[in-house]
Image (cartoon, rainbow, N blue to C red):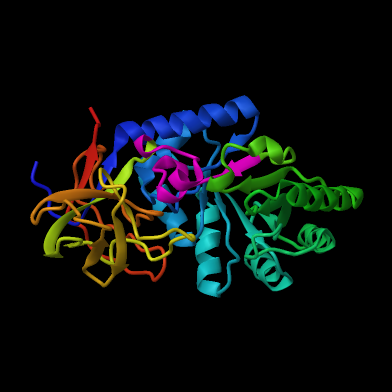
Amino acid sequence: MDIETPSVLIDLNIVEANIDKYQSYCNKKGINLRPHIKTHKIPELANLQLQAGAIGVTCQKISEAEAMISEGGIDDILITFNIFGQKKLDRLRILSDKVKLSVVADNIQCIKGLSDTFKNQKCKLTVLVECDTGALRCGVVTPREACKLAKKISSLPGLSFGGLMTYPPISQSEKINNFLRKAKDLIEASGIPVHIISIGGSPNMWEVEKIPLGTEYRIGTYIYNDRSLMERGTCLESDCGLTVLATVISTPEPHRAVIDAGSKVLTSDLFGLKGHGYIIGFPKLSISNLSEEHGCIIGTGETGLKIGTARNVIEVTALILGWIMGGTVGFASVFIALSIGPVVQIVMPYVDLRGKK
């Protein structure tokens, strides 16, 4: 099969194995799984996750949630982002009529906007308080603030307090547990039940028992896995279900080569790693720098790469903004976006869903 490059290759055998493996793990640990679809953004793959046993999906944006329900089969969505702006709030209200919907918030202004939008709705909107347990992103920074927001949510029309949500930092389980336990105790002492404690993060995916208060786990990268997880020992190369196929277009010097995948395709968000991708079969080579359409590879000696050959690259993290066009999961044209840093969208001509029988 002649595939134009650069292209995304998805091995569905690996994808399905990753889905089943982690769902089985969560089942054994007694925690619900709510996959984050921002990694793939493909309704068909989300439905595979649900069929395996996930209780619902996590979205980062309203547009993601709208896309997820477009193909049917998805009826439980958590949006983990503060939502502002009346147009977005109106879309959120429309979305709530179609699915079981919950959102997060970490400030009064956000909560008031949600209440004003949902106060005349038949069903209340479930709101979780986002907590910053050390990752230094969004979230209230103390358990008392979490309790204060929980009380406010419970008092406002149109809203129902659902619980707590956090994106936990790596290897800080004691700090995370202390925060969540204190917040839960304070809220329940106020007479408000805490039904959900939503935790998650790919680096900690095999350590869910270290946060025993968690009732559901949000994770996205596990469906494909990537180089950052390989480096951490979280997965093996053979567990990586998504690669970027690129062609060697130039070898200016024996120790240098250039591929046709640049910053529009490969990520600039390196998570502390060196290089912009892992070249399968050439572990000592590094994609040292990117321009928009070029990826520059440097080796300590001769690269061994020949002009015109195609090579698979495992990304640090691959985000696909795309929908498979057509009913069945197979070889199809899709719209792809692979940027993690700057939001750069490109149109990829082909995605090869390899291994699907």
Task: Determine the image quadrant of residue 214.
Answer: top right
In the image, residue 227 lies in the stretch drawn in magenta: yes
Q: Is residue 124 visible?
A: no
Q: Nearer the viewer, residue 217 or 107?
A: 217
* Residue 141 percent location from the top left of the image: 75, 64
In the image, residue 145 lies in the stretch drawn in magenta: no
* Segment colored magenta: 216-238
Q: Quadrant of the N terminus?
A: top left
* Residue 162 percent location from the top left of the image: 71, 49
Q: Nearer the viewer, residue 80 or 278?
A: 278
Q: Is residue 43 visible?
A: yes
Task: Determine the image quadrant of residue 296.
Answer: bottom left
In this view, the residue farthest toward the right is 189
**Which residue is rendered at x = 25% and y = 37% of the image?**
328
- Asked if residue 256 lies left or right of residue 323, the reply is left
**Which residue is rendered at x = 65% and y = 47% of the image?**
198
* Residue 279 percent location from the top left of the image: 28, 50
Q: Nearer the viewer, residue 82 or 339?
A: 339
* Residue 46 percent location from the top left of the image: 42, 42
Query: Is 252 above or below relative to 58?
Result: below
